[in-house]
Image: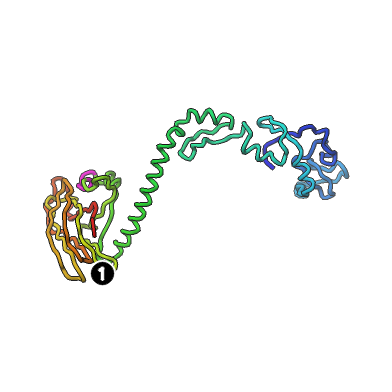
Amino acid sequence: MTNIDYEYVDESSIDENYKCSIGSKPFKHSVTTPCDHNQDDLSCPTCCETLSTKNLTPITTSLVLNILDKLLVKCSQCQQSGTQRGNLNDHITKFCSKTLVICTASDIKCPWTGAHDELKYHLSICNYEKLRSVLSQLISINQQFEEQIQTLTNHLQTLQSADGFNVWYMHERWVQTNHTINSWKNAYTHNHTCIIFNGKGNSTKICSKHKDIDKFTLISFEATSAWHDNLQINVIDKRIKRDIYSKIIILQFNQSKVFQFDWKNIDQIKFIPIHGTPHSDIQYDEKYFTLTWILLG
């Protein structure tokens, strides 16, 4: 039973066997005494036996409870009559106009709490509910974004743990918060929000999973220098550990650049930073560079 108080309707019609011996009121939270008398009080008026709370047992007899649950009651909150006692919990949680409820927009942080019969009016003025479509879309986009970040994180953790790969990733938000003076912000072009870079300014490489059978073509990529002007990068493509192609490209601090290739039948690409001129007001010497994207065939 619910803890909400209630009153029985037409108590005079209820059988005396289902009323307290002291107050002649129908049972609400009745107990059974060791002397097997049912009551709502802590002393037995029938046999005058002294009672202790630890000796009282709530009535669990199905026959008695079923009879009581079919009796009609009045809700003490909204004063509605005619509900069977056994259905009072359902009335309180679903229909009682005075039950406290939260706003249906609580999932998007609306703090309102009030009576059930005030909810309709609140929803008509609730700014959170009015913004639901926009906020839901943003939440969905953010969830997709988090899933993409997790996929990238898992993939790059694998690359970082592999010998010699040295591939790291950086999200645009981190750059905006921690590195306001650098060229990495120029790498986030065309709505790209995550880039990869060479850890500690050292060489990095990308290769096929199975070098003996998987070959690919380097088509193009977009790259930027993080700290240097005219940063020279030696791009070497290999096949079965042999150098097949080699080209030195020059990256700039102030803008990203797309480089076109058509290097076929390779199984590894290696990027080796060579030399560059530190950009003015930059105190870092590491030869970092970024790849915004890379297109393989």
Q: Is residue 183 magenta?
A: yes
Nearest the eye: 77 or 256 = 256
Could you say which is closer to the camera, residue 33 or residue 131?
A: 131
Quadrant of res 18: top right
Q: Tell me residue 12's x, y (percent).
A: 83, 33
Q: Secondary structure at mark 1?
A: loop
Which residues, given as a range, are shown in magenta? Answer: 180-185
Magenta-drawn stretch contains 11: no
Residue, x 14% and y 64% (percent of image)?
Answer: 245
Q: Which residue is mark 1?
A: 211
Q: Main secondary structure of the magenta part?
A: loop
290 over 66 or under it: above or below: below
Q: Position of residue 207 (x, y in %)?
A: 25, 64
**Horizontal and vertical percent position of residue 212:** 26, 72
Q: Quadrant of residue 101?
A: top right
User: Left or right of 73: which side holds 16?
Assistant: right
Q: In the figure, is residue 24 to the left or right of 85?
A: right
